[in-house]
Amino acid sequence: MTAKPIFVLNGPTLNLLGTREPEIYGTTTLDDIQGMATARAKSHGLTVDFRQSNREGELVDWIIEAREKACGIILNAGAYTHTSIALYDAIKAVNVPLIEVHLSNPYAREPFRHHSHVSHAAKGVICGLRAQGYEFAVDAIASLVGSQKGKS
Ligand code: DHK
């Protein structure tokens, strides 16, 4: 088993999942998503360190922390996706594979959501698949870090 966890980092307002605009984000709560990501990671012989913050600087600190402590990063930066050069710079500064996730499909929504600073630094992007996108992101990190569990 890889010793380092996958950091799963969630940005602003994602703590309200389940009741926040359910027609866009679904009814799955962030606790539910944590459980899904944890179970999926376990199936690959991996673990997750799951966090949420409404503060940009805290997300930057966590990405920098991942440089030493994580095997990969899954990031849903919420609205900071579209505004934060600080997050872009932090991702570029760490040599850890990062998968960007969104519950909704930002490209099918308002024009201000069509640009992502995170995408420029991400290894891959998963959007529009709601909570299941986090499971696919765990699969992607497992593949990128060469997890052997489950391979025949
Ligand atoms: C979540 C948010 O909070 C929005 O600001 C993004 C993203 C989309 C999501 O779909 O998970 O635009």
Image (spheres, rainbow, N blue to C red):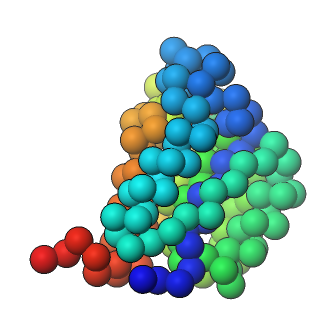
Residue 137 in view here: no
Residue nearer the viewer, 59 or 1: 1
Residue 148 in view here: yes
* Residue located 58% across and 32% down the image: 29
* Quadrant assignment for the C terminus: bottom left
Quadrant containing ligand 1:
top right
Q: Is residue 84 above or below residue 78?
A: below
Q: Is residue 14 above or below residue 121?
A: above
* Residue located 59% across and 25% down the image: 18
* Quadrant assignment for the N terminus: bottom left
Residue 107 point in image, percent of width and height: 49, 32
Residue 84 point in image, percent of width and height: 76, 51
Q: Is residue 100 above or below residue 97?
A: above
For the view shown, which residue lies furthest in the left direction? Answer: 152
65 with respect to 72 (left or right): right
Residue nearer the viewer, 5 or 25: 5
4 with respect to 61 (left or right): left
* Residue located 55% across and 48% down the image: 34
Tally the marks.
0
Residue 15 occupies which quadrant of the picture? top right
Residue 36 point in image, percent of width and height: 45, 47
Q: Is residue 45 above or below residue 78?
A: below
Residue nearer the viewer, 49 or 105: 49
* Residue located 70% across and 61% down the image: 88
Residue nearer the viewer, 47 or 69: 47
